[in-house]
Image (cartoon, helix red, strand yellow):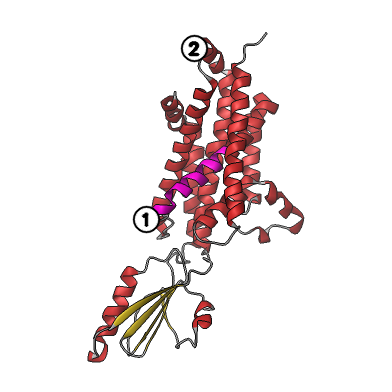
Amino acid sequence: MFYSFLVMNFRSKFLLVMNLILPIIFMLMFGAVFGKQSGAYKVAYYSDRDINIESGNWVKIDKPSDVESIKALKFDIVILAEKGKIDVYYLSSMAQSERDVLLFRTKYSSAQNQSSVIEIKAHNLELERQLSDLEYIMIGVIAVSLLSVGLNAGVSIFSKYVRYGLFKRFMVTKVKPAHLLFSSVGAQLITGIISSFIILILSRLVFGVNLFVKLHDIPLYIAVVFASVMINLSIGVLLSLFFKKAAESISSLIYTIFIFFSGVYFPITIIPKSLRIISYFTPPRYVHMMFQKLYGVNSMDNVLFFVLIIGFSFFGLLLGSYAIKKFLKPTA
């Protein structure tokens, strides 16, 4: 049954377009607009030797007076080299700097035939991550793809499939509600992971934006994907319960509203003040914030982060369980 739900997500042309192709189109479209803004992290460096690094993300600076001055700099990495010693300050949790430190060390060691480097010392400051516009957009694409996966699953399973008599067939086979629930939920989770992973790969290949999480953050990433799919699935379930035949049309309208008013493709500050309140009722807004938190941005505190994961997951499972039991119940 799990396999059937999963295959349907990729066999249905509508679901394939909404869950995968449309988010990719959004990624390419918005990425082309913001593509000139580099998604790479920025490195500042000071050296007491005459070296020059010609790269768009490297900037030569004067020597900072203290650590507070370093923190005030708008860079992901700050490298200070003096008297054969190199201090590397990490100001971003996303910076992958081994190659850059090696490049700097090579240039510093070979400058003016000076002595080799005596010591390299790392200082992990890890201040709040500042997303570039391109990174913000790519995370928004993931949030919208998960909106589509969950919302369309809820409507398809509990509106379209009900009309096609699928649940009547399930009643004949006496399938257990829990088995049906976890099969459908599992299929949507896998679909969400596949969709988001494809976007991560394409954003890296096409725009050079590295949003792959570290290995130890993968369980949290999956938890955020699961919670995102569940809260959006619950909306689809509610539409199916209240509007039945009109659920598909209304879900398309809600999908459009969520895209424009959630602020996942652009900050809500550009939305008229009278309409900004709408964003607080759109799940993609909070999904985007959870992903930001996962990527090192201080978008919310840890308590709210886990409350949203647990709350969204529980709400989706609760409504899904209720709807399955309702439609599997024989009519009098």
Callout 2 touching callout 1 (CB < 8 Å)? no
Q: Could you tell me if residue 265 is visible in this image?
A: no
Indicate the position of residue 195 as horizontal and vertical percent values: 45, 43
Residue under numbered circle 2: 173
Residue under numbered circle 1: 205
Distance between the alpha carbons at the discs numbered 2 and 1: 47 Å
For this view, does 165 lie left or right of residue 7?
Answer: right
Q: Kindly give the residue lying farthest to the left in the view shown.
A: 113
Part of the protein shown in magenta: 215-230
Indicate the position of residue 37 as horizontal and vertical percent values: 48, 66
Up the image or down, 287 lies above or below 209; here it is above
Comparing 115 with 232, the one in front is 115
Give the mark nearer the N terminus: 2 vs 1.
2
225 in the magenta segment: yes
Q: What element carries label 1?
A: helix
Residue at image x 43%, y 68%?
41
Indicate the position of residue 274 as horizontal and vertical percent values: 77, 55
Pointer 1 local density, CA inside 10 Å: few below 14, some 14–19, many at least 20: few
Q: What residue type is labelled 2?
A: Thr
Up the image or down, 42 lies above or below 2; here it is below
The part of the image, by quadrant, that contains residue 105 is bottom left
In the rendered image, the quadrant that contains the C terminus is top right
